[in-house]
Structure formats: C-alpha cells, structure tokens
Image (cartoon, grey):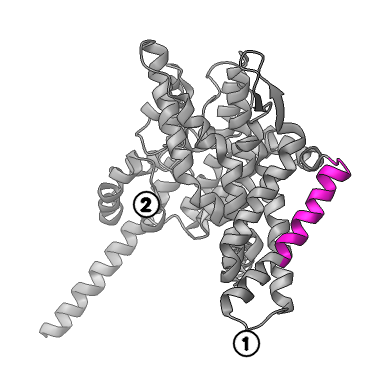
C-alpha cells in the first residue's frame, strides 16, 4: 500500500497537474467554470418548471432558459479563446480573439442554422432559425474546436512579432493592425471553407466527436468519469480539472434530453451533470458519497472524528464535502480513500440500472443547483417521487461500504490520541519534577 501511495503522490498527482496545467486545456477548463452563472440561471427555471407541472396556472418562463443555457455554445466560443489568450500570455488579443471565435462559430453554423424566408402574412423577408440547438449544449464540441483554432492562429501570429512599437506610429494603430491581420486571415479561410467549398464544419466535427460522446454516454463511460472525479479528488487534485474534457459530454447529454422531451419523447442520456451531482445520488454529500461517512463519524470513539463530524455536517447536508475530505482526512488516507473509490463505482452502477430500468426518471432539464439538501434536490432534478426511495436505498449502501473502513480508522486515531495524551502527561510530569 505504501508503494501505491508513493506512486499516487510522486507520479500520478504531479503528472495530472502538469496535464491540466497545459494552457490549451486550462483555457477550456476556465471557460467551463465561468459559464456557471448562465447554467444556474437555466437551472432556476428548470426547477420552476417542476412546479409548473403541478400548478398549470403559473406563467411560462422557458425563454429565460433559451437565452441562458440555450446560448451556451456561443458563450463558450468566446470564453475559450478569451482565456486562451490569458493562458498563452497574449493579453492584447483577449477580447479580439474571443469575439473572432464567437463570430466564426456562427459562420460555421450558417449553412444549417439560419436562412431567409418570406413571411406569407406580412410579405417581409425574415431571418428564420431552423436549428437553434447548436447554439446551446449541442454545439459545445464545435464551439471548443473553433475557439482552439482561433487561439492557435492568434498565438502563432503573436510569436511572429510582425509589428512592434515605433516612435513614428501610434501604439493604437499598431494594435489595430496586429488584430486586423490574423482576423482577416481567419475570416478568409473559414469563409472559403463554409461558403465557397460549402463544407459542413459542424457535421465534420460532430462525426469526429460522436464516438467520444457515445463512449461517454455508455455505462463504462459513466463509471470511468465518476471514478476519475473521485480518484483525482482523493489525491488532492481538484476534480473540476476534468471539466475541460468531461463537461462538454455532460452538457451535450442534458441538452439532447431537453430536446427529446420538448419533442414529446423521453430523456435517454444518463451521463449528465444532473445525474452525477444534482440528484445527490452519486455525489451524496459530495463526490465519493461522503454524507454517510459524516453521519457515521458522530458515533466514533475518537474525539477528533466526532469533532470533525460536527464541523462538517452542515456543508455535507448541502453536498459540500471539502471540509470533510481535507479534514478527516480522506486525501492520501488509504483507509478512507478505498471506500470512496468503491462508492464511485457502486453508486453509479445502481443509478444506471435504476434509471435504465425505468425505476427512476432520467433528468430531462438543466439543473446544476446541487446545493439544495437531498433528497429534495433528488426529487426536483428527476421530477419523480420515487427519488426519495432510491436516495435512502443508496444511503444504506454507502453506509455499509464506509462502516468497516471508518471503524478501523477510528481505532487507529484513538490509539494515536492515547499516545499523544500519554506523551503530553509525561512531559508535564517531567517539567514539574
């Protein structure tokens, strides 16, 4: 076990930190973090819509969701390129690169999204959006790829140092020219591809990423995503580092579910942020299902663990487990890391078969407000009263997994406390003598 822990601390953790510290990955991760307010706005409306089903007289507020979460890919196209310039240390190009990325993303959608049509009633020619879905979660992969290409062009141009400061030319003129050159090149190239060659960029990128998305939406993908989240977390690496890779899959999944339900169908994608986090079935009390651990700690013999239980129970109820993970601690503690890993496999397996078997609704609307205590958030996210039953079933399962490991760790901590008390007593006696 010592050899494994050494490998985690000396090889895995530094390697993963280096990978996720890469500016290209960091740009995507930063963008995914900054779009959270837009997701939360859509989440509020999704929760509101649960009550609309029970109170039909309430007004329809779906337009809020349409122009917040529904514009997600547009926002990401800007954010990735913007933060890319920050990560690559080209601050002069931040806004320009972001806006160029956004407009080129819209250019890529033109063949399939917007057309001009004559309104039969008014006789006016109007812009008709035939497929707005790619502006939301469905277009995330396209937005990210376009933004990364824009990042690359601006990065290469910045390294050329084509125009530097000059006493004879004002700085603002040099800045304009240095922005115009890469922008013109980008628009010409993408314009030629889209309008002259009539190449479907959106379709091409989707063909490339569909296998990745399909794997992500499979049972093995579900298990791998959950295990990686917990594995990184348990060795002190922020689980949110995975967002650059995982978040597009999760968001595309919930966007597709929303489309299916809107068309009169049923949600089919289980692998979403809503399933993993917001239902609090997989992340009960936080990643690794730590709420049962927190509750068990109240019965520990160790003073330290009982004290930590009291300190951490408030955050745990609201599905925040950083105080517990770092305070118990779970991080780099083999006795608690192992059950945490087990929970990341057992919980998702149960949730997958329960939802796939029709015993619990698959989340069908954007809802990232995971700070509502469970099982209330479980019910709101699934819109299914059976959520209460499955919450308590999983609570029991997780408790049984945590119990033997916590019991052994508790005995270990009790011995350590006794040794410290004995050493302190001896030191005091020696001092008095």
Closest to the observer, 242 or 139: 139
Name the residue rendered at 31%, 48% in the picture: 312
Furthest residue toward left: 432
Residue bearing the label numbered 2: 324
- Could you tell whether 79 is left or right of 163 in the image? left
Q: Magenta span has 274? A: no
The residue nearer to you, when weighing 48 against 327, is 48
- The picture places residue 427, in percent across and down from the top left corner, at 20, 79
Q: Magenta span covers which residues?
A: 181-199
Check disc 1 and report its element: helix, strand or loop.
loop
**Residue 287 location (% of width, % of height):** 48, 44
Question: Farthest front residue?
Answer: 123
Residue beneath the point at 31% across and 57% down? 414
Query: Residue at position x 44%, y 54% from top?
Result: 330
Mark 1, other Cα within 10 Å: few <14 / some 14–19 / many ≥20 = few
Q: Residue 254 placed where, x, y %?
A: 58, 31
- Image quadrant for the N terminus? bottom right
């Amino acid at each position: 076990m010592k050899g494994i822990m050494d490998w985690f601390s000396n090889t895995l953790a530094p390697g993963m930190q280096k990978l996720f510290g890469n500016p290209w990955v960091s740009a995507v991760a930063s963008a995914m973090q900054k779009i959270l307010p837009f997701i939360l706005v859509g989440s509020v409306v999704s929760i509101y819509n649960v009550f609309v089903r029970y109170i039909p007289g309430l007004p329809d507020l779906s337009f809020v969701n349409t122009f917040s979460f529904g514009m997600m890919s547009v926002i990401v196209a800007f954010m990735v390129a913007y933060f890319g310039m920050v990560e690559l240390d080209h601050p002069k190009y931040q806004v320009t690169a972001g806006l160029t990325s956004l407009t080129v993303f819209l250019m890529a959608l033109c063949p399939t999204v917007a057309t001009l049509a004559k309104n039969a009633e008014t006789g006016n020619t109007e812009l008709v959006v035939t497929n707005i879905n790619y502006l939301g979660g469905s277009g995330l992969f396209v937005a990210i790829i376009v933004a990364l290409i824009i990042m690359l062009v601006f990065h290469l141009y910045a390294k050329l140092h084509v125009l530097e400061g000059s006493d004879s030319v004002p700085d603002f003129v040099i800045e304009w020219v240095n922005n115009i050159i890469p922008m013109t090149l980008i628009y010409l190239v993408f314009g030629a591809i889209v309008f002259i060659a009539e190449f479907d960029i959106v379709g091409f990128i989707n063909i490339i990423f569909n296998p990745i998305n399909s794997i992500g939406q499979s049972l093995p993908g579900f298990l791998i995503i959950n295990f990686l989240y917990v594995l990184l977390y348990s060795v002190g690496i922020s689980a949110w580092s995975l967002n650059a890779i995982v978040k597009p899959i999760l968001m595309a999944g919930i966007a597709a579910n929303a489309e299916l339900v809107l068309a009169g169908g049923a949600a089919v994608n289980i692998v979403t942020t809503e399933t993993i986090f917001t239902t609090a079935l997989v992340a009960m009390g936080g990643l690794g299902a730590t709420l049962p651990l927190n509750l068990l700690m109240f019965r520990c013999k160790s003073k330290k663990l009982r004290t930590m239980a009291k300190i951490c129970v408030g955050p745990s109820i609201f599905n925040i487990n950083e105080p517990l993970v770092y305070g118990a601690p779970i991080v780099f503690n083999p006795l608690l890391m192992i059950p945490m890993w087990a929970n990341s496999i057992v919980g998702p397996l149960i949730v997958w078969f329960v939802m796939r078997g029709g015993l619990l609704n698959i989340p069908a609307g954007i809802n990232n407000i995971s700070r509502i205590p469970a099982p209330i958030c479980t019910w709101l996210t699934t819109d299914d009263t059976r959520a209460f039953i499955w919450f308590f079933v999983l609570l029991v399962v997780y408790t049984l997994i945590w119990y033997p490991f916590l019991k052994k760790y508790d005995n270990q901590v009790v011995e350590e406390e006794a040794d410290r008390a004995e050493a302190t007593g001896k030191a005091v006696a020696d001092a008095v003598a």
